[in-house]
Image (cartoon, coloured by chain):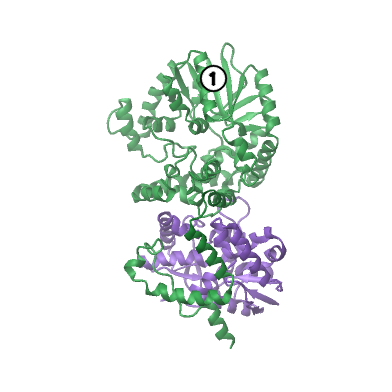
Chain colours: A purple, B green
């Protein structure tokens, strides 16, 4: 099986290790990875800020670049959710929407991976990330009353030696929210600090997520406060990386 | 004041902000427990959403049916185009009955229309009888929450207010003592009132009934004693059939406070013998909202407040930061839909986390509406030339991988060179360390890996 890699602009620029870990995980899962020349961005920041025209233009070009692939996989849940939202543009964008998946979603739903071979003997707090949680349906949100499930936690829990801790308010938003982090910096920071405190109180050594944007926000806050909490993307954990010093 | 500024002011008292957040999260937890105890909760939401959408799709028919049925029961039904017409109508009705002293149970519509101030100017004394509403009325401030109007206040603050305004002993903060003070004070107001105003939770088209849900019984008391009952309601409150009501009564209180049902569910079917009942139905922008396919769903709202309680932004910025009669996600939508220029910051006062959509008992897609309103704000206000240029440049750059890569490398280097004190003055850097600034991008590393 051949899979096209979708590495969002900010991961490309700020956290390339997440992209590399994603490639490794996919290859270890037995799929061939291609990295087509595509626009750097799917257009999400423009759409969320109310610039629909720019978002549509970028979205169309983005979708065309992935036209030849049956599966497109990315390590950023909010970007994947945004690409799914492009369906309303029709054409290549509508055709792409159902074929694009977040990494864990792809492993579980397409490849049928139930447990991941690896070891991670740490106490891990999982930050679901709202767009993965509610946009992609990777888990049941805490306010919904249907049967609970969690695709990402399932993969993590299958690692040898790992201990998943449960922070209070397990799926509350971290306050990143794209331009919200700048426009509403005070509320954003308060939300992020509250999440950090919840993970720390639960005894987490590592906070992980399928959304690198949430993690960059949390990591920036943790670093400034000198918190011992380390931020790692789920792909890094699955690829067998060690937490940063 | 824009939302971010008001939120910053709210957060400047971290202890109060933390307490406010915890108090409302507790309500959210009670809601979760109550919802979880109902088998088929999600199916119930589905059902409620369908009924509300059906009601709105045939709103004119249902309103006419309601008017017919209520009139047949002996009530008088009035239609008001806007807040001014509503206020004038209510005043005229009160004057017609010679009413000077009015008790009013909770009504967000009268907050929206500014009825109290209008009646006060005409020399009519209005006492809000919902305890929380009375507290904010005595403080001369708007409610900060649609279900718990005084949730922003601590008990000691209420004690101080009652001491100052109601002559209660100083230093009281015991809930039972405070409630007793309020009860005595309100009881006097009930006894001397010559009219009772209520809102309406639901208007039943097939029976002409008006349903009011309270926890304090104040709607009953306020209408049982005076000879005149005036109901003030938005035109969207109508349900097609009395038979639909149980779906909403099961959802409303559980979503609002985690109670299985409100302590009182009062049904008014026409005036009682010898009394007068008027129903004032208000449009005030609702028809315009109904005409907008992207936003009309907001009219399905049953004002349970669940979206406020779950909203991480509302909990950390307080109801007053919205500067609108209804706060939180639904308030942001309603206010910005009405006036996107005046309320330009509200559609952006959300991370789009989506929790509001999932708690909403009638499944309003609030995040989608907030995004639509962000576009509306931009369309109405226009972007400054700098924003226009910046957005165009960024979009053009990001569409071209090679250019983006070169620009990215430059930007990373530039960002690394920003002196720390300057970095700490940026909105990102104020509380967050610099993001990692790797020497090589993923694209570069990936090429290296292949070669």
Q: Please give left or right for residue A72 compared with residue B176 in the image.
A: right
What residue would you read off at disc 1? B229
Quadrant (top left/top right/bottom left/bottom right) for the N terminus of chain B? top left
Q: Nearer the viewer, residue B84 or B274?
A: B84
Quadrant (top left/top right/bottom left/bottom right) for the C terminus of chain B? bottom right
Q: Nearer the viewer, residue B385 or A48?
A: B385
Q: Residue extending furthest front?
A: B385
Question: Residue B4, relative to residue A97: is it above or below?
Answer: above
Give me the residue at 48% from left, 71% from top: A232
Give me the residue at 30% from left, 25% from top: B167
Q: Chain of mark 1?
A: B
Q: Nearer the viewer, residue B151 or B423?
A: B423
For label 1, count other residues whose C-alpha is less than 10 Å away and answer few (under 14), some (14-19) or many (20+). Answer: many
Question: Residue A191, relative to residue B449: is it above or below?
Answer: above
Q: Please give left or right for residue B318 compared with residue A56 in the image.
A: left
| Residue B356 percent coordinates (x, y) | 55, 48
Q: Quadrant of residue B399?
A: bottom right
| Residue A156 percent coordinates (x, y) | 55, 69
Asked if one can make out residue A243 in the rendered structure from this viewpoint, the answer is no
| Residue A95 percent coordinates (x, y) | 72, 65
Q: Please give left or right for residue A105 compared with residue B420 in the image.
A: right
Q: Please give left or right for residue B43 compared with residue B125 in the image.
A: right
Q: Nearer the viewer, residue B339 or B161?
A: B339
Element under disc 1: strand
Give me the residue at 53% from left, 82% from top: B445
Question: Residue A2, relative to residue B191: is it above or below?
Answer: below
Give me the residue at 41% from left, 74% from top: B414
Q: Quadrant of residue B320?
A: top left
| Residue A233 percent coordinates (x, y) | 51, 70
Question: Residue B104, relative to residue A93: is it above or below?
Answer: above
Asked if one can make out residue A171 in the rendered structure from this viewpoint, the answer is yes
């Amino acid at each position: 099986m051949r899979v096209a890699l979708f590495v969002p602009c900010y991961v490309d620029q700020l956290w390339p290790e997440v992209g590399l870990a994603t490639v490794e995980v996919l290859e270890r899962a037995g799929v061939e990875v291609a990295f087509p020349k595509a626009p750097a961005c799917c257009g999400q920041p423009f759409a969320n800020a109310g610039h629909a025209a720019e978002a549509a233009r970028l979205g169309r070009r983005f979708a065309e670049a992935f036209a030849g692939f049956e599966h497109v996989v990315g390590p950023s849940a909010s970007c994947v959710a945004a690409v799914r939202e492009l369906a309303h543009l029709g054409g290549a964008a509508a055709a792409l929407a159902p074929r694009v998946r977040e990494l864990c979603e792809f492993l579980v739903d397409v490849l049928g991976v139930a447990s991941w071979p690896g070891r991670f003997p740490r106490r891990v707090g999982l930050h679901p990330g709202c767009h993965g949680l509610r946009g992609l349906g990777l888990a049941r949100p805490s306010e919904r009353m249907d049967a609970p499930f969690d695709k990402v936690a399932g993969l993590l829990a299958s690692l040898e030696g790992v201990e998943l801790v449960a922070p209070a308010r397990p799926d509350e938003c971290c306050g990143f929210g794209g331009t919200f982090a700048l426009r509403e910096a005070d509320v954003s920071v308060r939300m992020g600090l509250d999440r950090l405190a919840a993970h720390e109180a639960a005894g987490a050594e590592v906070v992980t997520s399928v959304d690198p944007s949430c993690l960059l926000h949390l990591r920036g806050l943790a670093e400034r406060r000198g918190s011992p909490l380390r931020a790692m993307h789920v792909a890094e954990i699955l690829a067998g990386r060690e937490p940063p010093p | 004041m824009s939302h971010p500024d008001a939120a910053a002011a709210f957060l400047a008292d971290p202890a109060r902000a933390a307490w406010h957040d915890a108090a409302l999260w507790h309500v959210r937890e009670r809601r979760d427990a109550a919802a979880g105890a109902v088998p088929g909760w999600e199916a119930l939401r589905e059902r409620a959403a369908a009924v509300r959408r059906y009601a709105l799709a045939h709103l004119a028919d249902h309103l006419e049916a309601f008017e017919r049925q209520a009139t047949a029961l002996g009530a008088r039904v009035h239609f008001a185009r806007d807040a001014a017409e509503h206020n004038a109508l209510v005043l005229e009705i009160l004057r017609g009955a010679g009413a000077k002293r009015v008790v009013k149970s909770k009504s967000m519509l009268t907050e929206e229309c500014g009825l109290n101030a209008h009646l006060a100017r005409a020399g009519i004394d209005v006492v809000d009888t919902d305890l929380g509403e009375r507290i904010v009325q005595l403080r001369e401030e708007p409610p900060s929450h649609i279900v718990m109007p005084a949730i922003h206040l601590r008990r000691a603050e209420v004690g101080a207010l009652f001491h100052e305004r109601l002559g209660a002993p100083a230093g009281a903060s015991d809930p039972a003592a405070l409630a007793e003070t309020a009860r005595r004070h309100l009881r006097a107001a009930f006894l001397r009132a010559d009219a009772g105003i209520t809102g309406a939770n639901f208007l039943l088209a097939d029976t002409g009934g008006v349903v009011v849900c309270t926890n304090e019984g104040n709607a009953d008391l306020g209408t049982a004693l005076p000879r005149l009952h005036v109901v003030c309601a938005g035109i969207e409150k109508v349900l097609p059939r009395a038979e639909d009501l149980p779906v909403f009564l099961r959802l409303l209180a559980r979503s609002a406070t985690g109670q299985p049902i409100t302590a009182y569910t009062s049904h008014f079917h026409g005036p009682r013998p010898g009394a007068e009942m008027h129903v004032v139905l208000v449009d005030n922008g609702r028809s315009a909202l109904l005409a907008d396919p992207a936003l009309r769903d907001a009219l399905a709202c049953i004002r349970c407040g669940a979206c406020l309680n779950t909203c991480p932004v509302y909990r950390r910025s307080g109801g007053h930061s919205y500067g609108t009669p209804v706060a939180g996600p639904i308030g942001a939508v309603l206010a910005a839909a009405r006036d996107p220029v005046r309320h330009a910051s509200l559609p952006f006062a959300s991370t789009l986390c989506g929790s509001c959509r999932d708690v909403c008992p009638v499944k309003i897609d609030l995040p989608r509406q907030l995004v639509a309103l962000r576009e509306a704000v931009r369309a109405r206000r226009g972007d400054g030339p700098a924003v226009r240029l910046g957005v165009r440049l960024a979009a053009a750059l990001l569409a071209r991988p090679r250019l983006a890569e070169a620009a990215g490398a430059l930007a990373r280097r530039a960002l690394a060179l920003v002196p720390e004190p300057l970095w700490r003055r940026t909105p990102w850097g104020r509380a967050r360390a610099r993001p990692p600034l790797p020497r090589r991008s993923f694209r570069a590393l990936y090429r290296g890996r292949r070669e």
